[in-house]
Amino acid sequence: MENNPEKESLRNRLLEQRDNTSFDLMKIISGKIQKKLKKIFAFKNAQKIGVYYPIGSEVFTQDIIQELISQGKDVFLPKVIGEKMEFRKIVDFSSLEQGSFDIMEPKDDCPVDNNLDVILVPTVGISPSGIRLGYGHGFYDKFLAENKTTTISLTYEKQIIKNIPKSDHDIPIDWIVTEDSTIQTQR
């Protein structure tokens, strides 16, 4: 866990703001984001896609996961193993179990493959240039430093922040999709 008071303060403020979104509004926003996501060429043409299972007030991904599986795409979810994260293939929601941080993760018998075409990345806040504020554990940054792939942040429009303090280990995100906009960042 990083120790940056400025990031921690911003993270707490953004989480509180996001957590105040009603369930009904989160469903509407998530549906709009899913429609916009399907228009991104890199996502539409990907075969092996990493997706997170949402916690709290994160953008819902269950419908995205279901749709990808029904399209015959290979769907992978992250699993935390010690200090690292890996992606494992699921065939449906029964492939998941409660894992680290009370997040639904693939079971141990799901095959590992970290060579993915696209990864949807959970986000607490993000700048228009793709600097992402996560939960501070660094799992995605560590993974992305070792595994080059196209990244897409699914987030609420209100979570886009002009300036997010950048750490040396932060890996910029390629695309940002909100209920109102799709942004290709300048990497």
Image (cartoon, rainbow, N blue to C red):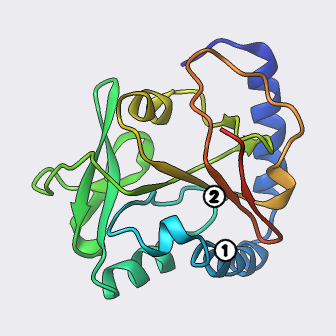
- Quadrant of the image containing the N terminus: top right
- Quadrant of the image containing the C terminus: top right
Q: Secondary structure at mark 1?
A: helix
Q: CA distance from mark 1 to mark 2?
A: 9 Å
Q: Quadrant of residue 75?
A: bottom left
Position of residue 127 measured from the top left corner of the image (x, y, whole percent): 79, 40
Q: Quadrant of residue 118?
A: bottom left
Amino acid type of the residue tagged 2 in the rendering: Glu
With 17 as the anchor, is 122 left or right in this view? Answer: left
Circle 1 or circle 2, nearest the eye = 1
Q: Quadrant of residue 9?
A: top right
Going 76% across and 40% down the picture, which residue do you hit? Answer: 129
Q: Which mark is residue 163?
A: none
Pick the front one: 42 or 179:
42
Position of residue 42 measured from the top left corner of the image (x, y, whole percent): 50, 65
Pick the front one: 81 or 117:
117
Position of residue 157 measured from the top left corner of the image (x, y, whole percent): 83, 60
Amino acid type of the residue tagged 1 in the rendering: Ser
Going 36% across and 40% down the picture, which residue do you hit? Answer: 100
For label 1, the residue is 30
For label 2, the residue is 58
Q: Are marks 1 and 2 in contact (CB under 8 Å)?
A: no
Position of residue 17 measured from the top left corner of the image (x, y, whole percent): 84, 50
Image: 57 above or below 143: below
Given the current orientation, which residue lies at the most extreme right position? 162
With 69 as the anchor, is 90 left or right in this view? Answer: left
Given the current orientation, which residue lies at the most extreme left position? 109
